[in-house]
Image (tube, rainbow, N blue to C red):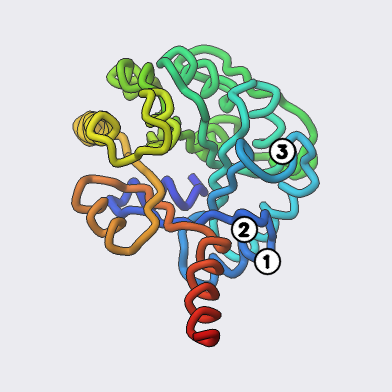
Amino acid sequence: MTNQLMQRIASGQPVFGADARTFSPSVVEVYASLGFDYVWLDFEHAGPNPVDSHLLEQLTRAAESSGIELMVRVPSTDAHMIRKVLDTGVKTLVLPRIRSAEAVRSAISATQFSYDGEPGRRGAGIARANGWGTGSRPADDRDDDIFVGAMIENDDAVDDIDDILSVPELGFVFMGPADLSVSLGKPFDKTAPAVQDRIERVVNRANEAGVPAGQTFPTAESADDALEAGYDVLTLGSELSAVVETYEDRLESLRE
């Protein structure tokens, strides 16, 4: 196993990441130098199309050379999309818009050469992930490096959470409070009791099942509380949110 996130979580330690909204390899290197464990790349809501693999290849090279993992939120669970992203060398995926255990199983099958005792749906081709055809790592070893998370951002997924948590090779669940609030008819009211109740239910069930739980937390205080609540995968904002927070206060103080 070469996936550093999997290694760290297997050792009982939480992992911390930051969102690179600019999709810049330079930001990847900066996050690595700061000691983050992963870089969150959200291709569902921003950035280029990940099927165009050239940018992802640059990002994976930056990550590998600086010792950090990429956590890529793909825009869909389409098998073609998943295979293209993995072929660039990405090892950690987040599946969006999950509504059922069957959707998770189908997507994870596309990340594996062998899955749950049967042939997987990951394709074999000449790509960066296998050294452009020169790689000799066994398929089982490459399967073992893939870490897949499911976004829990729909009330249907909450209803099906026990079955989702039992899907073979599911690595973690990641809460999406904003979209969850939309699915509950309370758009962007992430603190609504119904939203918080469902988040707590998922995290508790994940802890009981031994599946890591994650979410984005905007402050160190909220992240510290999340660790106490049983979270293991914590994204701590983005470079753009840091710029806004830093420069807004600085500029305001100078103009007073």
User: Is disc 3 surrounded by few (<14), some (14 to 19) or many (20+) residues within 10 Å?
Assistant: many
119 is higher (above) or lower (below) than 182:
above
User: Is disc 2 surrounded by few (<14), some (14 to 19) or many (20+) residues within 10 Å?
Assistant: many
Q: CA distance from mark 3 to mark 2?
A: 16 Å
Looking at marks 2 and 1 on the same chain, the residue that comes earlier in the sequence is marked by 1
Which residue position is annotated with label 1? 26
Q: Point out which mark residue 50 bears.
A: 3
225 is higher (above) or lower (below) than 248:
above
**Residue at the spot x=43%, y=53% of the render?**
235
Which residue position is annotated with label 2? 63
**Residue at the spot x=59%, y=56% of the render?**
20
Residue type of the residue flagged with mark 2: Ala
Q: Is residue 135 visible?
A: no
Give SS at disc 3. Answer: loop
- Residue 213: give x, y in percent of width and height: 33, 40
Left or right, residue 86 beside residue 125: left
Q: Nearer the viewer, residue 102 or 130?
A: 102
Q: Is residue 8 visible?
A: yes
Looking at marks 1 and 3 on the same chain, the residue that comes earlier in the sequence is marked by 1
**Residue at the spot x=19%, y=31% of the render?**
208
* Foreground label between 3 and 2: 3
Residue type of the residue flagged with mark 1: Ser
Give SS at disc 1. Answer: helix
